[in-house]
Image (tube, rainbow, N blue to C red):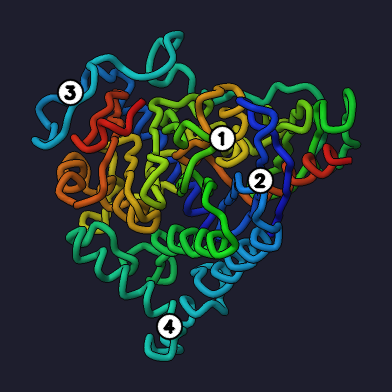
Amino acid sequence: MQRAELGLGSQLDEQIERRLRIVSTMGTIIGIDLRDPAVPSGALDAAEAWLVEVDARFSPFRPTSEISRLARGEIEPEACAPDVRYVLTRCEELRVASHGSFDIRAEGLRGGLDPSGYVKGWAVEEAAHVLEAAGARNYVINAGGDVLVRGAPEAGRPWIVGIRHPLEPDQVVARVALPATEGRHALATSGMYERVDHIVDPQTGLAAISWLSLSVAGPSLAQADAYATAAFAMGRVGLAWLAGLPGYEGYAIDPGLRPSWTAGFDPLLV
Amino acid sequence: MPKRAITALITTVIALVLLLSFKTPADSGAAGGAPALVSIGPGSSIGPASSSGPLAGGPGAGDSPTPPGTRPPGTTPAPTKVTAKGSGTFTGDAVQEQFGVIQVQATMTGGKLTAVTVVQMPTRGRSGFISADAAPILESEAIAAQSASIDSVSGATYTSEAYAQSLQSALDHAKG
């Protein structure tokens, strides 16, 4: 677990109080950018400790995790911690909702049981809850390219999140404004950027290449992340499937670099 | 870790498939396959105006890292301080991972991280268009620093523990 904390000033206004905590865990890097000066640093410590704990307990790469022990049949789901059971239940609901395109037990996944596609987003939402309990109302958490925000970066404008160009990593292809009102907003992206093993379509066993990337916006990061994975795996019909999900919208880029998006995504583009 | 090897293999295969399949973006017509409930954006390709094609900016096979200060694997260079504390270019440790050595440089300006440059990286990362140029969060920082109107970036690039370690050490050097 690596971490660094920088007192980074904003590009827009040097006076903006900003704390950035970087945590390397769950096979990725998680950055917490907190804009509430009154929140004690202990809240960032607690959020970080939680993320590290989730990795220890849920990682399919760690032989001692409950997930690994479940996969080996050493324990029954009933013997797992309540939050492990909760995650497994949510993953099963997502499998049904996605007609099997999101499946933590799909063939080819490590150990035969890999809820990572849900766990990361869920863990970040819980970490956000830890921050909020300490008074945080304005933050962005970026977990390996999946983003959760609340509030605003500064008075008078919303959080603006870029969607990374699928082929040119230092470019963005769209800018998404996440409203400053109504609690949390998430933007998760699945794509060819990395970890291509997680976008194999469980129904065909083949890599899904209808899209170079597919982003999902909505209130829950765990849901948005899972929906992005599922819609990506579905291929061309993935966006239409997303359009039918209340509260969630999609934006996808095809191999010709042409963007498509659901009607509800339109007002988010700036 | 075998999983990483498998991941790398799949990555390479899919990268190759894509490189072979989508050289001509105009061929993969989108109109016929577009879902009914979806708005199709402006017909033009997205990307920087300077880009001559979808793969123009991707790291090409055979590219090699060309930053200054390339060092032999396994060595830990001294931090390179250019100006005052919190400003300058800081070279991280060279960190061994399964496929080679990763080493990055952090450029700080007035305490702000403005760029992350890869000094060394395994050939694997350059072999496909899966870029190893940066990890998502800190590259997001760098992008955001260049574009005053972006706070964060969605869509990950290559990430590894070794990358994080090297960057961590560079940031530690920067903090002095």
Q: CA distance from mark 2 to mark 3?
A: 43 Å
Q: Which residue is mark 4?
A: A82
Chain ID at mark 2? A
Pinpoint residue B60: horizontal percent, then vertical percent. 52, 23
Pinpoint residue A45: horizontal percent, then vertical percent. 68, 62
Q: Is A52 located above or below residue A267 in the figure?
A: below
Q: Relative to B81, is A80 on the left or the right?
A: left
Chain ID at mark 1? B
Q: Secondary structure at mark 1?
A: helix
Picture residue at 57% right of the left edge, 28% below the top: B143
Q: Quadrant of the C terminus of chain A?
A: top left
The answer to whether the residues at label 3 and label 1 have Cβ atoms under 8 Å apart is no
Q: Residues within 10 Å of mark 4 (few under 14, many from 20)?
A: few
Are the residues under marks 3 and 1 on the same chain?
Answer: yes
Q: Earlier in the sequence, mark 2 or mark 4?
A: 2
Q: Which residue is mark 2?
A: A20
Which label lies toward us, 3 or 1?
A: 1
Q: Residues within 10 Å of mark 1 (few under 14, many from 20)?
A: many
Are the residues under marks 1 and 2 on the same chain?
Answer: no
Q: Can see residue A50?
A: yes
Task: State which quadrant residue A177 falls in.
Answer: top left
Task: State which quadrant residue B80 falls in.
Answer: top right
Which label lies toward us, 2 or 3?
A: 2
Q: Which residue is mark 1?
A: B140
